[in-house]
Image (cartoon, helix red, strand yellow):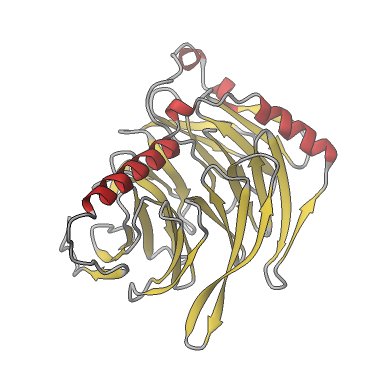
Amino acid sequence: MTCCIAVSETAVVVTCISVDRCFVYSLDSGNVINLTESLGESYNNMPINDRDLQKTCAAFSDDGKLFAYNTNKGKLLSIWNTADWSLVENKTLAKHATNIVFTPKTNVIVVGDKKGDVYAFDKFPVCVLGHSSMILDISFTSDEKYIGTCDSDEKVRISHYPNGKNILYYMMGHEAYVSGICIMNNLILSGSGDQTLRLWNVQDGYLQDKLSLHTPIQSLVRIEDIFAAQLYDSKEVHFIKIEENGSKQRLKDIKTITFKENVASLGAFSNQLWVIAGISVHEFTVDSRNEIIVENENPKRTLILNGLVKSFVCLENTNLMIFLHKKMIEKQIRTKICSNYSMPALNSSKRIKLHNNSIC
């Protein structure tokens, strides 16, 4: 399902790009707002895009004052003031968005797209950096000095921010698209269609550890000091923690939660994790120190949110992640055929250091 969930201290947003609906549920009042209805009559008269590959993207700023999501029509980035949920501005994108984040300190909206470009939308859109393939996730260090990006061609990249052409490292080693990354302190966790999670050191680019989950990874979110991994076409969510092992950090798979239906999206705020599984929304509280994950029960809230998600229509022919998975399988088949020929072994995990401005 091409939907996602985003969470702040005061609101939960569920949005679906296939049918172009974006619902805001207030955690304080229990009221529901459909943001798409406030985009204007001219926008409403535009046809739904049911052909191009798309990915639903939505994000709150760290202070919760702003919200942004990508609409189905016109390649628009829609920005909202969360105090009264008034429309701030619609900005035009060059290509369909594949990821939306806010910078952690300055609240600048940063968007990755299908072309492989990353734009910062402050007063004017500025191209921060570019990949040779589509961007799948973006993450910042807490001091906003570095930006991490990953793409559909197996690469993880750490660049300076806002001068993204100044590349610190490429982390190479994944054998399929890199679908998610999270930065915590000086470490970056990446998840891939090759079924592995990999932990890298941001400062030197070296691989610290690797963990196989035996299923392609579709997304990663951080809940305090724990990470949740959504698996492709799966009912499971894995919870992972980084632990010290001598002088190195290791990945620890601490818990798996299985739902009745496939997991469609993960969203997190503070120590809360929200999960869309099928047409149901689940809320968890995470105690990262004691590694305890408890599901919260609020029947009234759950009933409303389930009703909103139930209104979404699944158009699998436009789901970007399904396309990437099929493309990966086709590549594996071609590789297996070519393996009949003698080929030299490649280094499975390496980092490439690039000097300042060596790649533009």
Q: Within the image, what quadrant is residue 154 found in?
A: bottom left
Q: Nearer the viewer, residue 327 or 311?
A: 327
Residue 27, image x, y percentages: 75, 42
Q: Residue reaching furthest bottom?
A: 246
Residue 105 placement, left or right of 299: left
Residue 117 placement, left or right of 54: left
* Quadrant in the picture for the C terminus: bottom left
Residue 172, image x, y percentages: 30, 63
Can I make out residue 130 in this image?
no
Residue 137, image x, y percentages: 42, 50
Q: Is residue 251 above or below residue 301?
A: below
Q: Is residue 179 above or below residue 142?
A: above
Which residue appears at 46% of the width and 48% of the height?
101
Q: Nearer the viewer, residue 31 or 249?
A: 249
Residue 237 placement, left or right of 281: left
Residue 290 placement, left or right of 243: right
Can I make out residue 101 in this image?
yes
Residue 17, image x, y percentages: 50, 29
Q: Nearer the viewer, residue 279 or 42?
A: 279
Q: Residue reaching furthest top?
A: 45
Q: Residue reaching furthest front?
A: 340
Counting the numbered discs, the total is 0
* Quadrant in the picture for the N terminus: top right
Which residue appears at 53% of the width and 44% of the height?
59
